[in-house]
Amino acid sequence: MHVSLSEIDPKNRIYCNRSLNMRNIKAVGFDMDYTLALYKPEEFELLAYQETLKKLVNVGYPESILGWSFNTDHMIRGLAIDKHRGNIIKLDRHRFVKVAYHGFQELSREERRSLYDASLAQSYEEPDYALIDTLFTLADAYLFAQLIDLKEKQPEHIKKTPMEIYRDVRHAIDLCHRDGSIKLKVAQNPGKYIKRDPALADTLLRLRHSGRKVFAVTNSLWDYTHVVMNHIFGNDSRQLNFDWVQYFDIIVTGAAKPSFFMSPNPLYEVDPETGLLRNTDGILNSEAKIYQGGNFKQLHERLGVSSGPEILYVGDHIYGDILRSKKELGWRTMLVINELESELDALAKFKDEFKRYEELLQLKDDLDDELQKNQLELEQIQKSQPKTKSQKQSSVEQLQASIHSLLQKRDSTREALRRSMKKYHQNFHPTWGQLMKTGHQNSRFAAQVENYACLYTSQLTNLLNYSPNFSFRSARDFMPHDFVHD
Ligand SMILES: [Mg+2]
């Protein structure tokens, strides 16, 4: 079967940053949460949020917060929390802060520039900043903003510093994921919280039939993994069964990524019936399929791969799934970005608006160039020795008038451009704009995708649109000087 790329809906394509020939891939691995299993954020994240509120009240936050609600669309991936100042910021690929909010209050251009002085070359990373880089952490950001907002409006209710508030939120959310508050509810009714993609089983089967080993490496523990996999592979009965295990050659739970890609961890065999762990002394039994912990070495051995680039790993978390596996082991990587679908929708829908915005940008640049030319000419005349004084006077006056009118035009165009850019971005997201851009630069999130993901796509079942031996090719690289002879 040969499908030309243009026949695939852009939303179901796989995009390539770094060329990858699938013929060289011997094993394909998957993360579980938000990769194999796509959650319904409006249900799942809401559950996490509500459970977290209860825990915050337990540690002294006012009971009134129990009445709060969570707008799951308000935050986006790629933002950073400024833990000291109580702000949430969006950065471009050069680490300029382009949008900043204190709670839900937007900072003015001047405030933003004075707080985030570009000359300080901050890294905007832990421990002073927290990156919102998974869909799980959208709730962290929203709750943090709500509490900062409350602190500003009713300081008598919250005496803690923004840093303390951040720690409390993070700790409470973490606790919900660990203590069963979330897991038990999901186990009772997985269909309420997790989507089911009917193409999932076929996608994995096709890879296996093509001779690839298929594996899962998840940080979730066995009990939760079992519940989630049962649901996504189509078991509707209340009774869990092991049918889903057939789609994998090996399943590693409790993997503690990203440390799984770097340091040795104890490896246990999981007894699927009882969930009990058996010590392995680091040796993989050729019969057993389900493990907890361990690290990449045992996995490589068991998969029969001799080097990292023979593995393609698919995950949704740049830091936990993609960055280390690529940097340390040379695994090839595919990042799942669910948001790509709506991003592509908006790109198509507002194409004409983008053209008008680009024309305005060009006009502003032309006016800037013209202005500079005039200013230079004026300087030269003022320095020169003209034949007559009046000649010099009239040239100077002409140029000054031209500069004056150019300045006015340039400023009004600049203002129109700013408005048009803001409006264009708001088509993507009313608060934060386009996921992959800030202004007309790539966002920091986009830069990370470019650097660490060989491939990226909206969902992993898009693999079904390509032959298992497909050769993904990246676009040619360009630098600004490549275009001078055009
Ligand atoms: Mg994940």
Image (cartoon, rainbow, N blue to C red):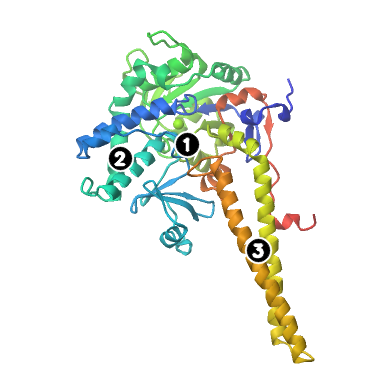
Residue 246 x %, y %: 50, 14
Residue 233 appears left or right of 155: right
Q: Residues within 10 Å of mark 1 (few under 14, many from 20)?
A: some
Check disc 2 and report the residue beneath it.
169
User: Does any portion of residue 265 appear in the rendered image?
Assistant: yes
Check disc 1 and report the residue beneath it.
317
Residue 291 vs residue 170, the one in the foreground: 170
Q: Earlier in the sequence, mark 3 or mark 2?
A: 2
- Work out how far the residue at label 3 is from the one at label 2, CA to CA, in angstroms: 49 Å
Q: Which of marks 1 and 2 is nearer the N terminus?
A: 2
Residue 168 x %, y %: 27, 41
Q: Which quarter is ligand 1 in? A: top left
Residue 435 appears left or right of 485: left
Check disc 3 and report the residue beneath it.
409
Q: Which residue is drawn at 50% across and 56% down?
A: 96
Q: Which amino acid does label 2 sit on?
A: Val
Mark 1 C-beta to ligand 1 under 8 Å: yes
Q: Residues within 10 Å of mark 2 (few under 14, many from 20)?
A: many
Query: Circle 3 sits in a helix, a strand or a loop, which is it?
Result: helix
Q: What residue type is labelled 1?
A: His
